[in-house]
């Protein structure tokens, strides 16, 4: 799924909000995990309508902004200020309950609530908007917080509120669209939804691709590299960057020919019998930089630049001047 496809779906749903269906669900730890919330509608200026408008506004302003950019989750190591697209699969699906039959929410579910899921639907298109329920958003969740309300009579006084309450906010922690998660806050996924397992799985797949290419003698050091960091996926993220490496897709003869022609890479990593020998983590990082094409040389000044975060440029049109005219 591309960023433009995501924006098109958001536009289709938000440009005519009156034609867009809207439902609110609580996600709980106990079964069924999806609980539909009910609302009392009072005219046009009701809480349900305001809630729908706030979610649509957040979608439009944050995810459909003209400058909003989308990239593959494989580039999370770059820590860009962009939206990451994470495909849902059998091995990683943080909200499987979205595809199950919903129960009915009751006040007894409040202490078990972990998040809120808003469903926006128009025709065959649907967006799920997930909003994480932090403790502060459920003040009575632990029954330790005292809440009060103002009561007007002969004088203004406060009385304790004993009924549970939930705070809805105008934010979208992540979206689920067409079996893809879209978010700029991957740390929430990492802290609460096991995203580190997805990262390590992608890193392992990358190591398998390197091994099958036959350019390294042994992959033991690569495996040790991704498992560094006391359980944190810092190094596995770096390995993810080369999961779709164009270098790995090159013909092997041409690949070695280009490496040996390169002033930067010829002899940079020790090789023997047409294979790299990886004995240190520094050599592993050199291999990652090689496969990621991290360094770029200017055609004009012949200066080499470190392009840690990069974007593929549009091809130059032939037979035109710099104004695009023949």
Image (cartoon, rainbow, N blue to C red):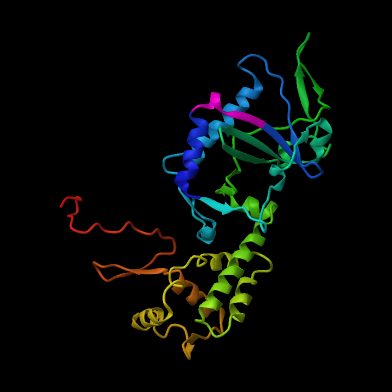
Residue 322 image offset from top left, x and y in percent = 19, 54
Residue in the image at 62% along x and 75% along y: 223
Asked whether 199 or 225 is in front, the reply is 199
Asked whether 181 or 226 is in front, the reply is 181
Residue 149 image offset from top left, x and y in percent = 76, 22
Residue in the image at 65% along x and 57% along y: 195
* Residue 279 figure quarter: bottom right
Q: Is residue 115 above or below residue 105?
A: below
Residue in the image at 45% along x and 39% along y: 65
Residue 12 image offset from top left, x and y in percent = 49, 34
Asked whether 302 or 5 is in front, the reply is 5
In magenta segment, residue 85: no
Q: Residue furthest bottom?
A: 273
Residue in the image at 76% along x and 30% along y: 165
Q: Residue furthest left?
A: 326
In the rendered structure, which segment of residues is drawn in magenta?
A: 16-23
């Amino acid at each position: 799924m591309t960023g433009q496809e995501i924006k098109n779906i958001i536009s289709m749903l938000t440009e005519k909000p009156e034609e867009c269906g809207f439902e609110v669900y609580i996600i709980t730890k106990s079964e069924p995990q999806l609980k539909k919330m009910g609302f009392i509608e009072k005219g046009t200026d009701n809480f349900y309508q305001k809630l729908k408008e706030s979610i649509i506004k957040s979608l439009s302003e944050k995810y459909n902004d003209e400058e909003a950019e989308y990239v593959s989750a494989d580039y999370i190591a770059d820590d860009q200020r962009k939206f990451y697209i994470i495909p849902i699969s059998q091995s990683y699906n943080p909200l499987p309950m979205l595809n199950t039959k919903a129960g009915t929410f009751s006040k007894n579910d409040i202490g078990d609530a972990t998040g809120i899921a808003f469903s926006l639907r128009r025709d065959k298109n649907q967006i799920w908007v997930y909003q994480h329920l932090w403790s502060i958003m459920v003040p009575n969740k632990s029954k330790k917080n005292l809440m009060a309300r103002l009561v007007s009579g002969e004088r203004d006084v406060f009385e304790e509120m004993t009924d549970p309450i939930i705070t809805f906010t105008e934010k979208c922690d992540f979206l689920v669209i067409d079996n893809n998660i879209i978010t700029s806050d991957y740390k929430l996924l990492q802290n609460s939804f096991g995203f580190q397992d997805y990262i390590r799985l992608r890193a392992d797949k990358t190591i398998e691709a390197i091994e099958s290419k036959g350019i390294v003698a042994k992959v033991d050091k690569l495996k040790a590299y991704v498992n560094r960091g006391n359980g944190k996926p810092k190094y596995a993220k770096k390995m993810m960057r080369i999961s779709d490496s164009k270098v790995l897709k090159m013909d092997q003869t041409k690949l070695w020919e280009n490496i040996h022609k390169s002033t930067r890479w010829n002899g940079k990593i020790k090789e023997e019998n047409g294979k790299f020998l990886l004995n240190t983590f520094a050599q592993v990082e050199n291999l990652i930089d090689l496969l990621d094409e991290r360094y770029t040389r200017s055609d004009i000044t012949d200066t080499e630049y470190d392009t840690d975060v990069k974007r593929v440029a549009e091809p130059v049109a032939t037979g035109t001047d710099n104004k695009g005219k023949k």
